[in-house]
Image (tube, grey):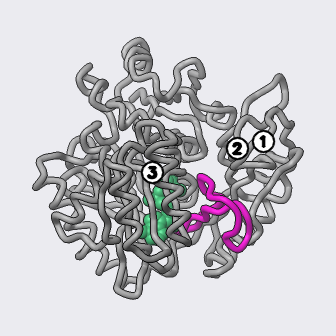
Amino acid sequence: MKVLVVGGGGREHAVCRKLAVSPMVDALLCAPGNAGIAEVAACVPQVKATDVAGIVALAREERVDFVCVTPDDPLAMGCVDALEAAGIPAFGPNAYAAQMESSKIFSKNLMKKYGIPTAASETFTDMDAALAYLDAQQAPIVVKADGLALGKGVIVARTIEEAKTAVVDMMQGGRFGKSGARVLIEECMFGREVTVLCFCDGKTIVPMPASQDHKRVFDHDEGPNTGGMGAFAPSPLYTPEIAARTMREILLPTLHAMNAEGFTFKGVLYVGLMLTAQGPKVVEYNARFGDPETQAVLPLLESDLMAIMMAVRNQTLSELEIRWKDASAACIVLASGGYPGAYESGKVITGLEAAQAAGATVYHAGTRRAGEAIVTAGGRVLGVTALGDTLRQAVDSAYAAARLIHFDGAHMRSDIGSRDC
Ligand code: AMP
Ligand code: GLY
């Protein structure tokens, strides 16, 4: 088969590496891809992930047999709908089902209607009503823009004043464009966070090993939120008891709810959980693989990812047995100095071979080839993943390899996984 992967970050590199070793895949393309993905796939940098017409045209021209649409934007824009309409099988939810991520109000309404545990919340389209509501609430309280906002549309406000400022920013300041025209104000939950990525074909939902992301830029969860500074799997917090309860109270009810609402979710359903004193509750759904969780989860997959993706698309997931390594994986993100604020690009990266020779896998996120050199080209630059028999071993190996890599201004957290080792 000839397969096209849409996207160009660390997560897509992890997907491409798994597809490249599938006996079913003869040729692999990636649009736009990056300097690391280019080692396992033919990259098409001129076609951006959000160029839906360009992706369909590329798939047609190249006579691609199957497309994996990985990032949130093209999914929300209907990339899977457009590919399937053109007769090209695709992995990922259609635009309607992708609202599980692209509209927080859509998914909140679904959770409310079907009694899926989550934070209590109210929806507002009118700013004055939102401000008046806040006057009667207590802090801390959470304000969320409805639409996609690059992970930045959530404010956990420590005071009512801060919450009001967030509401005004979103609804009047236009800080998130159309995404902020509607806001959710919700109860603040307390607990540890776990990510459960699930393969879902609309009939069957199969959780992958649970993982933990590290969203803040500095050690001890300080500094601003980022796309994710590191991840590991499996999560020791996600005990068999919590896993069983989550399946019963959240995953199966979500599958039922989506079907009862008349839509079929095919792809990866990302379930972000807060493990509260009252049990697991949904923080958010995403309609795709997480980044960097995928760089810690997919290296543990023993089964053929291509076979799984086809089964999801064809709704035959129940016929597959999906096997995972009995090991732990940790991924350390190397970011550009200054990220998630302003940062410089074009810094020469050294030590990539040494890190691989040390037994790690280096996933490229924001990199580009410049002549013979590989240089930085984004906020999150690389994800260095290592496996181990225990989480401690995986973390130590990943750090040992990550420390062999250098570029000007490189920043990584030094405490990925350490709270749970
Ligand atoms: P989201 O974009 O919905 O994942 O939110 C980003 C982050 O904000 C989450 O990972 C949580 O750490 C935090 N968060 C979101 N909703 C809540 C909530 N209701 N209570 C406490 N923290 C929250
Ligand atoms: N790591 C968080 C996300 O992918 O949304």
Q: Tell me if residue 210 comes above or below residue 22 in the rendering.
A: below
Q: What is the spatial separation of the Cα atoms under label 2 and label 1, in whole angstroms? A: 7 Å
Q: Residue at x 35, y 65 (%)?
A: 133
Q: Secondary structure at mark 2?
A: loop
C-beta proximity under 8 Å, tags 2 and 1: yes
The answer to whether residue 301 is seen in the rendering is no
Report if residue 220 lies within the magenta region: yes
In terms of image quadrants, where is residue 306?
A: top left
Tell me the SS state at disc 1: loop
Tell me which numbered mark, 2 or 1, is placed earlier along the sequence: 1
Across and down, in percent, residue 287 comes to 36, 49
The residue positioned 32% from the left and 33% from the top of the image is: 90
* Camera-nearest label, 3 or 1: 1
Q: Amino acid at mark 2?
A: Gly
Kind of residue indicated by mark 1: Tyr
Whether residue 79 is visible, yes or no, is: yes
Q: Earlier in the sequence, mark 3 or mark 1?
A: 3
> Is residue 41 in the magenta section?
no
Q: Residue at x 86, y 43 (%)?
A: 350
From this view, report whether residue 240 is shown above or below residue 414. below
Disc on res. 343: 1
Residue at the spot x=68%, y=47% of the render?
380
The correct choice, above or below, for 405 with respect to 250 in the image is above
Residue hosting label 2: 379
The mark nearer the N terminus, 2 or 3, is: 3
Residue 417 shown left or right of residue 82 in the figure: right
Mark 2 or 1, which is nearer the eye? 1
Query: In the rendered structure, are the residues bearing label 2 and label 3 in contact, judged by CB atoms less than 8 Å apart?
Result: no
Q: Which mark is residue 289?
A: 3
Observer-nearest of 408 and 173: 173
Q: Which mark is residue 222?
A: none
- Range drawn in magenta: 212-233
